[in-house]
Image (cartoon, rainbow, N blue to C red):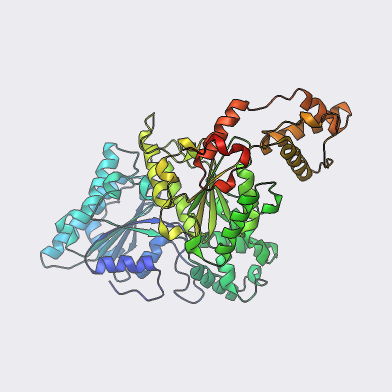
Amino acid sequence: MPNPPVALPTWVQSVVDLYNSQAHNQFILTGNVNDRFGSGIEPGAGGCSLAEYLQQTVVPRYEVVLRYDLGNGLRIDRGGQIFSQWLGAETPPRNARPAIEFITAYLRYCANLAGLGQTRVKVAVILNDADLFMHGDDRGAEANAAAFLVREWSRDPGLTRHDLVSFILAENLTELHPLVRQNTQAARVEIPLPTPPEIELWLAQSRGAGALALAELGSDLGSVAEALSGTTLNALDRMVRLADHRKLPLKAEELGRFKAEIIERECPGLVEFLPPKLTLNNLHGQEALKTHLRQNLALWQARRLDLIPQGYLLCGPVGTGKTYVVKCLAGEAGVPVVVLKNFRDKWFGSTEGNLEKIFRTLRALGRCCVFIDEADQSLGKRDPGGTEPGVSGRIYAMFAQEMSDPANRGRILWILATSRPDLVEVDLKRPGRIDVKIPLFPTATSEESWAMIRGVGKGRGVELPENPPETWATKVPDLMTAGEIDALLTQIQREAVAGKTSLLDALGRRFTHYLRPVGEAVLWEQTRLAVAECSDADFIPERFRAIGMAK
């Protein structure tokens, strides 16, 4: 096997080194396995599939290359004449277990020939989408037998001493059969999403091929590539082709939106990008919090990454605007803010596979904020009990590992939100994962309530006076939340339209006999929990300090 050119990706060089050193002859390739590869190998190269790329770069001198997938069955990509000498007129089987047995028999045949001092045939086997026929959830006899034989390709001395190599391709490691994924004789290599230099090279080649879509992006393709990091080359190719067809050149200011749309399509239902429509100027009150966030954003822009918290915990009663704070941060930060959505799945291994895909995307984005709402429910438990202890425990372990990775400091900022911080695992809240815990509170006084009513109303296009009318000013309640006020304004706007009355009259009637949507006892208990979690007393208004400071 030849040494790879310097320009080849790091993961390819790793595969070649591991094979040339005879440390491994089987490789489990996971991650970005369905992208296009090979841009930059030859001028104007448009890329190829991973299986084809492996044949070009890792096993270019192998006489026989066999490829199997569940849809196409067994294909002889190279060495058909050599293979037919053994195969004869027999038709290769299509089903997984017979096909794996068939390949195993041929590998043993080649190994026996070499052992007898006869012709040595170098054979490579590529299993595409191996999780479809060796899935972690399938423990039946057929899947077990196929997984056992594939594992034997890397463990049987009769095979490993000869020029036989196998590649097992699957997007997510956790979805593979445990006999395969836990095989210590197989090397696990993750293929990352394209790096900015790889994207820049692809953009340069596409522009050189006359892509109209790239004509107005300027000469600094490095900055364009940075803005598009986190996407696949396949997705970028589709974007450029569509823009070419529409004769609409891409604009630099639109790249962030394009990237968000691409990644949301590539990770359907798993992530969502918050649009940068608000800034911290839209956040009413919370002056200590806004100062702290702006200081950290300034450090982030100055690339003092060693001073950036690893993560934040936003806690407080329901409706206090935890998600709103993150939306304001999204516009202020100038970096993507990614919301983790429905990554849990009922199928075995799929939840963990979804998290693998999400984490892989986050690492490729460069700098980003990651928002997880209802963190007490989403992040799993170390000892969960219940009906799915295995899944919840694995979710917890995956988040714990990713959140504490020091390589992510200054690159991925985790923001967790919950009204029940006491239910979030203590280890997930420790420094090194969550460095700053910020409480959010209902209004402490009726004056704060009115100021927030005016602020929320202004955002809805409702102008209210600086002070409420004297006839009912004393009836404005305290302990109001932003969510509660937003719902209240919807109701009184409806009343004003339906009853042909003024907004102030409608508000006055509501406040005369005001019924809270959340009981006051619940508000105070959730406020106490938020105070108890707080990592900086400056975040706590005077009224609430006494209720939870003694931890």
Answer left or right for 259 relative to 425. right
Of 135 and 98, the residue lying toward us: 135
Of 518 and 272, the residue lying toward us: 518
Residue 338, percent from left and from top: 56, 51
Residue at 58% of width from left, 76% of height from top?
Answer: 208
Residue at 63% of width from left, 49% of height from top?
Answer: 327
Evaluate whether residue 227 shows in this view: yes
Q: Residue furthest top?
A: 513
Toward which corner of the image does residue 291 lie, by quadrant? Answer: bottom right
Count of number-bearing discs:
0
Residue 307, percent from left and from top: 49, 61
Toward which corner of the image does residue 508 lie, by quadrant? Answer: top right
Evaluate whether residue 350 shows in this view: no
Of 95 and 396, the residue lying toward us: 396
Residue 103, percent from left and from top: 26, 53
**509 shown above or below 447:** above
Q: Residue furthest left?
A: 116
